[in-house]
């Protein structure tokens, strides 16, 4: 599903989304704001590139980052839950990873962790490895995040708001 279709689904359901981005650095937010009418459903985002920002702004426990690393499913979940709570959204999406060309946080280039936090404490997380340049990995991460959110929206149906 495209960002346009995600926005339309959220509009129809009167639900809001927010994003917390590390490796995607605002690209996911840019996908949302490119869609006309997105102001009805997109609350905003936080680019939390530094681990201190992940903790201080989004509430990812420092212990999570210390134990699992910044490129981990646990940190992605913390980002998604943190931005959902911070901005009061129905849905939070978190992206973190190693875009390359060097490994990051003990993970090989191309490793991406994505999470969606939704109504009723619903959490979905996945780790993917993408090939290509730094920009390719970041673009693939955005597409994968939109797909993950799309799947969660479909799974929950119109069951809704917080």
Image (tube, grey):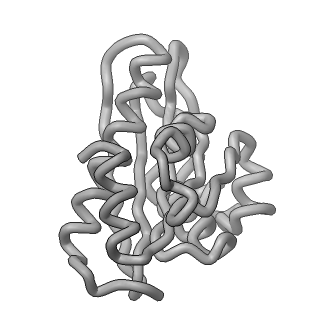
- How far across and down, in percent of the image, does residue 6 sit? 33, 55
Foreground pick, 153 / 7: 7
- Image position of 28 with respect to 8: above or below: above
Question: Left or right: 100 with respect to 130?
Answer: right
Between 110 and 26, the residue placed more toward the observer is: 26
Q: Is residue 159 left or right of residue 71?
A: left
Q: Which quadrant would residue 148 be assigned to in this image?
A: bottom left
Q: Is residue 52 left or right of residue 94?
A: right
- Residue 162 visible (yes or no): yes
x, y (%) of residue 42? 54, 59
Task: State the residue at coordinates (40%, 25%).
Answer: 110
Q: Residue at x 34, y 37 (%)?
A: 143
Specify the quadrant of the image occupied by residue 22: top right
**Residue at point 31%, 18% (across, down):** 131
Q: Is residue 92 above or below residue 98?
A: below
Q: Residue 89, position in %: x, y?
A: 55, 73
* Residue 20 image point, x, y percent: 59, 53
Give the left or right position of residue 23, taking residue 138 as reference.
Answer: right
Q: Is residue 104 above or below residue 81?
A: above
- The residue lying at 46 percent from left, 28 percent from top is 138
Q: So how many labels did they put on this image?
A: 0
Residue 18: tell me if it is visible: no
User: 111 above or below 88?
Assistant: above
């Amino acid at each position: 599903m495209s960002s346009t279709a995600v926005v339309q689904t959220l509009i129809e359901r009167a639900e809001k989304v927010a994003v917390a981005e590390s490796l995607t650095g605002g690209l996911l937010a840019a996908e949302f704001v490119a869609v006309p009418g997105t102001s009805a459903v997109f609350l905003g985002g936080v680019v939390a590139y530094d681990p201190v920002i992940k903790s201080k702004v989004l509430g990812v426990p420092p212990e999570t980052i210390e134990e699992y690393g910044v490129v981990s499913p646990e940190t992605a979940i913390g980002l998604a839950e943190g931005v959902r709570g911070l901005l009061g959204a129905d849905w939070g999406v978190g992206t973190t990873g190693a875009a390359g060309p060097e490994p990051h946080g003990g993970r090989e280039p191309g490793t991406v962790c994505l999470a969606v936090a939704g109504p009723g404490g619903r959490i979905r997380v996945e780790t993917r490895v993408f090939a290509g340049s730094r920009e390719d990995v970041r673009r693939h991460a955005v597409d994968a995040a939109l797909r993950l959110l799309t799947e969660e929206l479909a799974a929950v149906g119109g069951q809704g708001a917080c």
